[in-house]
Image (cartoon, helix red, strand yellow):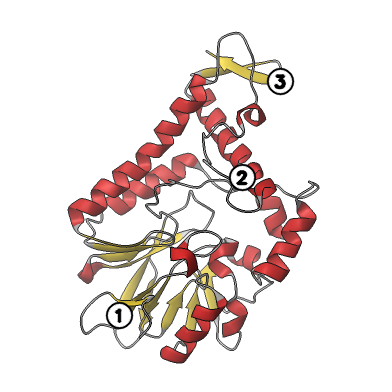
Amino acid sequence: MNDYIIPIFKDLDIYFIQGKKKGKVPYSNSLVIGDHLIDTGISSVRLKRVKKTFSIKKIIFSHWHDDHIRDSKIFSDLPFYCHVDTRPIIENIDKLLDLYDLRGTKAEKTFKVWLSDQIDVYDTEIEGVFKSKDIITMGDDLQVQVISTPGHSIGHCSFYIPKLRFAFLGDIDLSTFGPWYGGKDSNIADFKQSIDKVKELNLKTVVTGHSGLFRGEKLIKTELERYKNIFSEREAKILQYLSKEEQKKPKDLLEKNIIYKRYFFFKPFLLAMEKTMIKKHFDELNKKNRIKRKNEGFVLA
């Protein structure tokens, strides 16, 4: 078996499949549970190996983001499933332009080429949908509970096996980068609540979409708390750039290391996402009366 296919439990058909470049964007990690594959972002080469190695019968998407549904054409002979709120997006990827706020921008054309030519994302028919608390039988007898964990995106789900205290957390990814909420459907408050929801499960083993495999209840809770604290760290950085006199807009804080330390691929796309994330912090700070509107921008309250 390849070194990127890692059994998680002895005598159980549950495997962590690490994506290319250790699952870093524009790739992601996958999980095999019985005859189900969760997410297809590991790379086309690794997907083909998974197809040869396992008797996969169904594909599950944790959410709609392109790095998690890429290259799924390799399994076009199988049925695809996703959360009910995600279905309209995966079946019509033109919606990604609006959700990423790229329509009508200079990055629109490049992004379309990126989807079709680089990562092979296309309209995908969804056979069936699930919702929070649904139970999916994977393999012969593995009962997997759907946990709704929005915030990163609409319809984002985690997948939980209570008897094992194990979950696939998708893009509650416990990365050192921190939470990503650069879509128009992303929501900071929902993301925080989802992290708290996962923390209450007292998990002993987790797989995430970009950081891989974590073991140990204490470690997982510590990592969840560290991850959640990054919201506050970013908020503090934003406040440092604001004053009571000079008004600032979210775009004025781009390339200040508030979100991205470096623009590692497709910079126009990452800048658009950074602007959206900073704007969401502005909205949160405004609600908390930490900042206030002044003309077209914001100042400290």
| Disc 2: which residue | 273
Say which residue label 1 marks. Answer: 142
SS for callout 3: loop
Check disc 1 and give the amino acid type: Leu
Q: Is residue 61 above or below residue 218?
A: below
Residue in the foreground of this view, choosing between 148 and 37: 37
Foreground pick, 87 / 173 = 173
Q: Sequence order check: which comes first, mark 3 or mark 1?
A: 1
Residue beneath the point at 29% across and 84% down: 141
Left or right of 103? Residue 165 is: left
Q: Which of the two labelled residues, at mark 1 and mark 2, occupies the earlier sequence position?
A: 1
Q: Residue 296 shows which numbered tag?
A: 3
Image check: 249 left or right of 218? right
Q: Earlier in the sequence, mark 3 or mark 2?
A: 2
Report, in whole angstroms, how far the alpha carbon at label 3 lies from the one at label 2. 21 Å
* Res 70 → quadrant: bottom right
